[in-house]
Amino acid sequence: MIDSDLKKQLDSIFNTAVDGIITIDDRGHITTINPAALRLFGYEKMDDVIGKNVSFLMPAPDKERHDKYISNYQNTREKKIIGIGREVTGLRKDGSTFPFMLGVSEVKMADKVMYTGIIHDITYQKEAEEKLRRYALELERSNRELEDFAYVSSHDLQEPLRKIRAFGGLLKEENFEELSDDAKDYIDRMLNAAERMQNLISDLLDFSRISTRSKPFQKVDLNEVLGLVLSDLEIRIKETNATIKSGKLPIIEADKTQMGQLFQNLITNAIKFRKENENPLIEISCELSQKSIHISDFPGAKFYIINIKDNGIGFEQKYESKIFNIFQRLDGHKYEGSGIGLAVCKKIANRHGGDIYSQSEPGKGSTFIIKLSEKQNIKS
Ligand SMILES: Nc1ncnc2c1ncn2[C@@H]1O[C@H](COP(=O)(O)OP(=O)(O)O)[C@@H](O)[C@H]1O
Ligand SMILES: [Mg+2]
């Protein structure tokens, strides 16, 4: 016999548990049900439930299967649910259904056997999973669309463009002197526009290739990557009198080429959008963060936050989300470019389980903040 204190304790657990608890006898008849289980299945009184076969809380086809489970288990001792736990569907009084995790244990008493089922409602989890699944599908679809578009642009759009450029070039080389000044001007403008379009197409292709032509993740020393980028930009740095200061950067799992593209785009921007009367000063720093930032987070994930700060022209913070979109530019006419660099940076950061933001003020300069995961738990 259990003493009365222990019984009180068990009663209180039974009555206040957030999860539902139902006990059944060896024929499947409900012997007890706690308030949480009553609520989950939409019943008010225990009497509505006690004594009934537990299969009435299940929709077809589980309902029919359940009786077989019990007799099958009693004959074969093969555990399909008992001690294992599985996802099942519950049937509410109003006919609606909900998903739950069921854990069943067997309690052998002196003269009988009883089964205890713990019912953990997983509706929210399922909804979140479904949302994520749809989101992933949608993302996959739109990525595929972009890749298809890139394919079309590489073949079908580039070909006519090549012809325009080729014949325009011939006109300029062979018949230029016969043309009026106006006609010369038109040809120059036409060739410039065609070249701009060629650049846009090839930038767009680069953008689409971030996912299609990516390389597997490997250990990458970001100090080394930055060094290579700075040496590529050497002439530009000299010409503009830019100073670039960098703290120590980490080693992370990444796609090395893409890390190069990331730094290259951000540093090029920092130099390009400099103030006229001030030499560019670009400061790169890095700190470690343990906080969760992205859907691909996993427990204990480490993130690095890299800041790239400049003293350039800056921009109004309200345009922050705009500039990371493809082809979006703020000072389009004054500076060269196609407005794809930051979209590339965002796609690269996302592919590395991270993200990129910026903080800026007109006339004061901008800081681009990149969050990158130290390890890549998913293969992509
Ligand atoms: N460091 C920066 N300082 C000020 N504005 C910037 C900076 N970086 C980016 N921007 C703004 O964001 C826009 C988009 O940048 P990006 O995608 O690299 O395109 P692009 O360099 O071809 O213009 C730029 O046109 C500019 O208006
Ligand atoms: Mg750029």
Image (cartoon, helix red, strand yellow):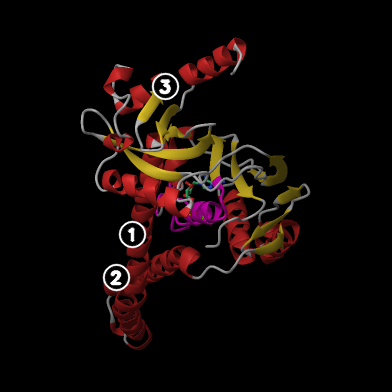
Distance, label 1 to label 2, CA atoms, is 41 Å
Q: Earlier in the sequence, mark 3 or mark 1?
A: 3
**Residue at far left of view:** 95
Which label sits in the foreground, 3 or 1? 3
Circle 1 residue:
141
**Element at label 1:** helix
Disc 3 to disc 2: CB gap under 8 Å: no
Q: Badge 1, how many Cα within 10 Å: few under 14, some, many 20+?
A: few
Distance, label 3 to label 2, CA atoms, is 84 Å
Q: Earlier in the sequence, mark 3 or mark 2?
A: 3
Let me know if residue 35 is in the magenta part: no
| Residue type, numbered disc 1 | Arg
Residue 271, x across and y down, in percent: 61, 51
Camera-side residue of 15 and 234: 15
Distance, label 3 to label 1, CA atoms, is 46 Å
Residue 231 shows in this picture? yes
